[in-house]
Image: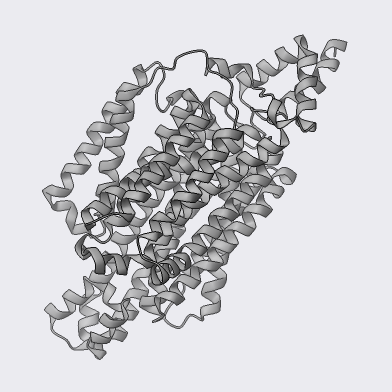
Amino acid sequence: MSLKTLRTEPLIASSLDQPHVVLSSRRRWAVTAGVMLGMFLAALEATVIGTAMPTVIASLGGLDRYSWAFSAYLLTATVSVPVWGRLSDLYGRRPLYLAAVIFFLVGSALSGASASFNQLIAFRAIQGLGAGGLVPLSMTITGDIFTLKERARMQGLFSGVWGLASILGPLAGGFITDNLSWRWVFYINIPFGVAAAVVVGTALAEPKREQHPIIDYAGAIWLTLAITLLLIALVESGDPSVWTRPAMIAPVAGAILFGFLFVRTERRAPEPIIPFSLFRNRMVSVGSITSFLVGTAMFGAISFIPLFVQGTLGGTATEAGTVLTPFLLGWVGLAIVGGRLMLRVGHRPTILAGLTVLTASFLVLSRFGTGTPRWQLLAVAGALGGGMGLVMLALLLTTQNSVERGQLGIATSINQFARSIGGAVGVAVMGAVMTISLTSQMTEIQRKSGLEEDKVSRIVHNPSALIEPIARRSLPPEIVKPLGEALAGALENVFLVGVVFAALGLVSGFWIPSKPVRPVGEAVEATTRAGTSAAECERLLMAEMTTIDAEHASVSVESTDSQA
C-alpha cells in the first residue's frame, strides 16, 4: 500500500462521517425541535379526531360518510409522499417543508370552520396533503443534518414522538371536545404549526441551487391518479361481493391504466418523480418490499386487535384503546434500543430479529379465543410493537445510508410509501378474510341461535353490532354468544394472514445486504476530495466538533448538491 493511500484513508473516513449539511450546534438542535414538532402534529392529527367524531356527526350530520373523514386524510397523505420527497431533492428541504406546513395549517383552519360534513371531508384531504410532506421531510432533514451514528439515536427519538402522539391523540381529542369545541381539535394545530415553520425557516440554511430543476408534472399526475384510485378500491373492498359491481371495476381499471402511463412517462423523463434506477440499489428495492410486507402486518394489528377486544372479549372502546398502548410503547422502546443495537451488531441482524419477533407474535395472536386472559393480549401487543420498532427504524436508516444526498428525499419517501400502501392492502385483504369467514359460519350461528336465516344474515353482515354497546344490548340474547365465537374464529384466520405477511417479510429480510452500504458516487467523490483537498476535510471535521456562531454559521454540502 502506497504512502499516499495510507494518508488518504483516514480522511475518507472523516468525510463519510460528516452530515450532508453541516450546521452550528444551536441551529441543528433548533431545526430538530422544529421538525419534531411538525411530525408530532401530523401524527397527532391522525388519531385525535377519532374521539371527536361522534360530536362532529351530531353537529354536521353525515353518518353515512363517517369513514371518509379518516380516509380522505390518509389517502392524500399517502399519495403525496413520493411527490414531496422527490421535489425536496430538486428544490431543497426547507421550501418544501414550509409548503407542507402551509397546506397542513390551511386544511386545519378550514376543517375547523366546516359548515357541512362534505366540506369537512374536502378540507381533511387538504390537511392530509400537508401531512404527506411533514413526516417524510422531517425524516429527510434529520438525515441531512446528522451523521449515521447520530441518526440512529435521533430517529429513535422521533419514533418516541410518534408513539407519544398516537397515545395522547385520543385523550387530547376527548378533552378538547368536552371542554372547548370539536372545532378546536383542528384550530389547536395553528399556533404550533406556525412555530415549527418559523423555527425551521430561520434555522435550516441550505446552499443555493444553481441549476433550474426540470419537474416531471406528467409523472406526478399519473402517479397521483393511479394511487388514488387504487386506495379508493382498497378502502371499499372489505366485502368481497363488491368486486362484481361495475362501480368497483372502474377504479381498478383506472389505477392499472394510469399506472401504465406513469411507468411509460418515468422511463422518458429527464428528472422522474421516482427514478427507477434507484431500485437497482438492492437495499432500496428489498427494503421497500420488506416495508410493504411489514406495513400489511402492522396496520392489520392496529385495525383488528381492538375489534377482537370488543367483539370477542366483550370489552369497551376504552379497553380496546388501552390494548394498543403496549403496542406503541413496545415500538418506541425497541426503536430506541434498536438504533443503538444496529450500531453494535449491524443493520441486518437487527432487522431479522424484529421480523422474527413480529412473526412469532402474530402466530401466538392467531391462537387466542374468547377465553384469552387480558394480560396475554397486552403482552403480545407489546411484542408486536417491539418487533415493529426494531424493523422500521433499521430499514429507514440503512436505506438513507445507501443513497446519495440527491436521492435522500425520494428514498426516505419510498420507504414510508411502501409501508402505507402495504397497510391499505393488508387491511383490505384481512377485512375480506374476516367477511368470508363469518359468512361461512352463518349456518352454524343459525343452528345455535335458533333464529330465522334472514335475521342471522343481517346481523352477520353487520358485525359492528357486537362492538357498539347500545347495538349489542339490542341483539337477541341467544345470538350474542354464537356470533362472538364466530367472530373469534374469523379473527383467528385474519391473524393467520398476518403470520403469512410477517413470514414473507422475514424471508425478504434475508435478501437485505449484510455489509454496510454506501453510495458509490459518494464514496468516489469522497476519495477525490481526500486526495486533493485535505484542508477541506479538516475544515469539515472541525465544523462538526465546534459550535459555530449562529449568526455566521457555515453550511457545507457535498459537491453532488449542485448537481441535484
* Horizontal and vertical percent position of residue 299: 42, 57
Residue 237 placement: quadrant: bottom left
Q: Residue at x 40, y 22 (%)?
A: 272
From this viewpoint, which residue is outermost toward the right? 3
435 vs 506, nearest the viewer: 435
In the picture shown, does residue 232 fall above or below 456?
A: above
* Horizontal and vertical percent position of residue 562: 56, 15
Residue 238 placement: quadrant: bottom left
From this viewpoint, which residue is outermost toward the top? 532
Q: Residue at x 45, y 83 (%)?
A: 371
In the picture shown, does residue 373 fall above or below 133?
A: below
* Horizontal and vertical percent position of residue 178: 40, 72
In the picture shown, does residue 188 fall above or below 349?
A: below
Q: How is the image coloured?
A: one colour
Q: Do we see residue 144 in this rendering?
A: yes
88 vs 10, nearest the viewer: 88
Residue 34 placement: quadrant: top right
